[in-house]
Image (cartoon, helix red, strand yellow):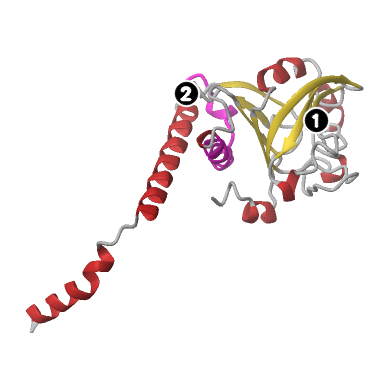
């Protein structure tokens, strides 16, 4: 009886267990390659001896940024050698919360203060928007665009690549620029940074250096404690 049951099981389940379509195999191979790429990037950053642990992004935020970077590298939308910039708006504005990372070596090239939009919150950025004149910060992945000289001096345009969350960035003039309210002295006076109209504003003394590091289609990831974004982002939920 046991032998008969075994034969019947093999007869009915065998074709199912042994079925591997070319499509499913290619999808599996692509997923494995993506995971391997993410792990490689993570290892470079986390185990780089030049990066003090106290100055690292949280593991979760770093992993999110690398997940998007890996996907866009895989499709050829990011050129080899381009850095990854991470901004963590879950941190208060009196803490250093922007990182520029060399993805070839895993070295953190820049780590400092960055402002958020005035209507996103005071010390913490709690609300985010993609709407014109909202004066809030927007979350998600961006490509850096061209540089220009405007009312804030040397500045860098941004193009949001997650339509629902930051697709209006260029129309809203969300750019990286320097500001006199985005520096340590302002924090010492008020306990927090000053706020922008939605732009990630940097200390004026460093803005030229940072812009030159990340200009010309590198990737920026702006993170915040926002359930809608975390649940709906196509990059984070791929």
Q: Secondary structure at mark 2?
A: loop
Q: CA distance from mark 1 to mark 2?
A: 30 Å
The relative height of residue 99 versus residue 23 in the rendered view (above or below) is above
Which residue is rendered at x = 54% and y = 32% of the image?
76
- Tag 2 or tag 1, which sits nearer the N-term? 2
Q: Which mark is residue 48?
A: 2
Residue 142 forms part of the magenta stretch? no
In this rendering, the label closer to the viewer, 1 or 2 = 1
In the rendered structure, are the residues bearing label 1 and label 2 in contact, judged by CB atoms less than 8 Å apart?
no
Q: Nearer the viewer, residue 48 or 185?
A: 48
Find residue 202 and report its horizontal and vertical position in percent: 78, 25
> How dense is the environment of label 1, judged by Cα within 10 Å: few (below 14), some, or many (20 and up)?
many
Which residue is rendered at x = 84% and y = 41% of the image?
122
Quadrant occupied by the N terminus: bottom left
Horizontally, residue 167 falls left or right of residue 172, namely: left
Q: Mark 1 = which residue?
A: 175
Q: Which mark is residue 11?
A: none
Range of residues picked out in magenta: 49-72
Direction front: furthest residue: 22
Find residue 109 and report its horizontal and vertical position in percent: 60, 19
Do we see residue 129 in this rendering? yes
């Amino acid at each position: 009886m046991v032998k008969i049951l075994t034969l019947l099981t093999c007869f009915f389940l065998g074709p199912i267990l042994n079925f591997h379509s070319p499509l499913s195999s290619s999808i599996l191979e692509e997923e494995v390659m993506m995971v391997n790429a993410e792990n490689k990037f993570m290892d470079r950053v986390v185990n780089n001896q030049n990066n003090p642990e106290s100055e690292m992004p949280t593991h979760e935020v770093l992993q999110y940024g690398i997940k998007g970077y890996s996907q866009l590298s895989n499709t050829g939308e990011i050129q080899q050698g381009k850095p990854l910039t991470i901004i963590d708006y879950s941190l208060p504005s009196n803490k250093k919360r922007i990182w520029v990372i060399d993805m070839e070596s895993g070295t953190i090239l820049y780590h400092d203060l960055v402002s958020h939009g005035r209507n996103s919150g005071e010390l913490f950025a709690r609300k985010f928007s993609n709407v014109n004149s909202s004066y809030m910060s927007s979350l998600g992945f961006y490509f850096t665009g061209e540089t220009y000289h405007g009312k804030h001096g040397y500045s860098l345009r941004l193009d949001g690549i997650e339509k629902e969350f930051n697709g209006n960035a260029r129309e809203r003039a969300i750019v990286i620029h320097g500001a006199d309210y985005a520096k340590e002295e302002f924090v010492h006076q008020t306990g927090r940074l000053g706020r922008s109209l939605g732009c990630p504003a940097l200390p004026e003394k460093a803005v030229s250096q940072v812009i030159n590091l990340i200009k010309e289609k590198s990737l920026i990831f702006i993170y915040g404690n926002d359930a809608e974004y975390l649940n709906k982002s196509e990059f984070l939920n791929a």
